[in-house]
Amino acid sequence: MSLKSPRKTQYEIRSAIIDTAPTVSRPIPVRADVHLDRLRDNVSVLRTQANDASLMAVVKANAYGHGMTRVARALRAEGVRHFAVANVPEGARLREAGLEAPIQVFAAPLAEHLPAYARHDLGVTVSSPAVAKAVVETATAEAPLRAHVKVETGMGRIGLARSEAERALRRLADAPHVRLVSLWTHFATADERDLSFTRKQLRRFRALLDELPNALLDEIEHVDVANSAALLALPDEATAFTGPLIRTGLALYGVAPREDMTDRLRPVMRFTARVTHLKTVTAGAPVSYGRTWIADAPSRIATVGAGYADGYPRLLSNRAEVGIRGRRYPVVGNVCMDMLMVNLGAPGGEGAAVEVGDEVVLVGEGGPSVHELACWAETIPYEIMTSVGPRVPRRYLAAKGEEEEQCES
Ligand SMILES: *Cc1c(COP(=O)(O)O)cnc(C)c1O
């Protein structure tokens, strides 16, 4: 692949496309570029922020839409040693891809799924006394289990009550085929400006640590509390534990949980589509299903080859903007399953230069940020990123001159 083609953007001139797998040239007018060099930059930003505490890379939900195995390999090559996923099949997929690092599964496990954890060497979230009991009873010399004991401090989701923790920890510590890997909790509001509830959760967690006997604490390898938001908002508190791990998802992908949290992260994904059709409509002409937009003047309308089945929310109908040739244009009419329409303005105006085949930036440089899109869609960046659909080809980019092993996403 030539790097000198004049049609390439500045970024691509500096970059080598390191995945030329067939998906890249799949004939479909939508694509997600995944900039692995930025992922690496984000790792070093976050490590500094974490006072060099170990990162646990959260690669659940296909690495927040970026492609789980590719992202995990890039992070492993960057020295990241701990990984987390949402469920057993995600962990099994990482094992099949050859990842040998520890992997924690965040879900509360069903007892009948525990043998699968052992089979794939996945860390079990011990979410209740019943799970602790099941873990102890399931683990064998041939199929040992790794336990991550989750305590409830205010998230209200899963975990042991403070009063239940010591007994469960002791039980797990005494079980010959169970490895007590971590004791952890999860914050509910670390992404809010008001950190008082996060501090309250921290106090509750510390109170639990204080009442546990030292001999028992010594059995636990890692104590962890922080997600991306807590790392960015309370780095010292988040890392002031034994063998701290920082469970980072969103920030790794270059997006801060709150837009004003940091400007040092670089978004890893750029989500684009292409103009597939152009027309000029007269005043009074309707656009798309339901005729929710009617032209009030002659208008140039571009049809773009992406829709809600690609992960572009239908709630963005008549709300969002896209970037084309460095300018912003509004989405008009309802977003369809596979297409959306954009108003390029008056015929002969600035939008007249737009041609069929032009790139349309749905999210990323040259278009809206993921925070902007999330705001228009009344959601959070997490949902936008994880919605980028399976039919959208991912193209992996790395800085020029870097070696990247090939693997499928
Ligand atoms: C998803 C998840 C994380 C990662 O959260 P980010 O905000 O993306 O950093 C951390 N911990 C748990 C328990 C999670 O479920």
Image: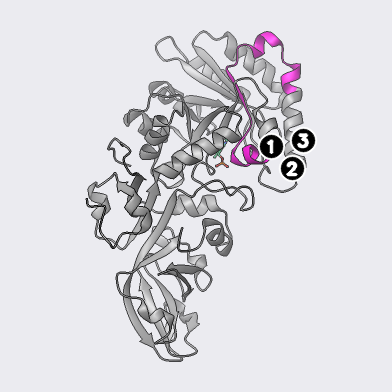
Residue at position x 76%, y 24% from top? 207
SS under mark 3? helix
**Mark identifier at residue 285:** none
**Lower position in the chain sequence, tag 3 or tag 1:** 3
**Lower position in the chain sequence, tag 3 or tag 2:** 2
Residue 407 in the image: state x and y as whole percent.
29, 38
Q: Which residue is tagged 3?
A: 200
Q: Where in the image, quadrant-wise, is ligand 1 located?
A: top right
Residue at position x 47%, y 76% from top? 332
Disc 3 versus disc 2: distance between alpha carbons?
9 Å
Q: Which residue is tagged 2?
A: 195
Q: Are marks 2 and 1 in contact (CB under 8 Å)?
A: yes
SS under mark 1? loop
Residue 324 in the image: state x and y as whole percent.
41, 69
Q: Answer whether residue 214 is magenta in the image.
A: yes
Label 3 C-beta lies within 8 Å of the nearest ligand 1 atom:
no
In the rendered image, the vertical position of residue 85 relative to residue 28, given as above or below: above
Decide: few, some or many residues near mark 3? Use Cα within 10 Å; few <14, some 14-19, many ≥20.
Answer: some
Amino acid type at mark 3: Lys
SS under mark 2? loop
Q: Which of label 3 and label 2 is nearer to you?
A: 2
Disc 3 versus disc 1: distance between alpha carbons?
13 Å
Q: Answer whether residue 194 is magenta in the image.
A: no
User: For the magenta stretch, what is the residue range?
Assistant: 208-234
Amino acid type at mark 1: Leu
Q: In terms of image quadrants, where is residue 69? A: top left
Amino acid type at mark 2: Leu
Residue 59 in the image: state x and y as whole percent.
46, 38
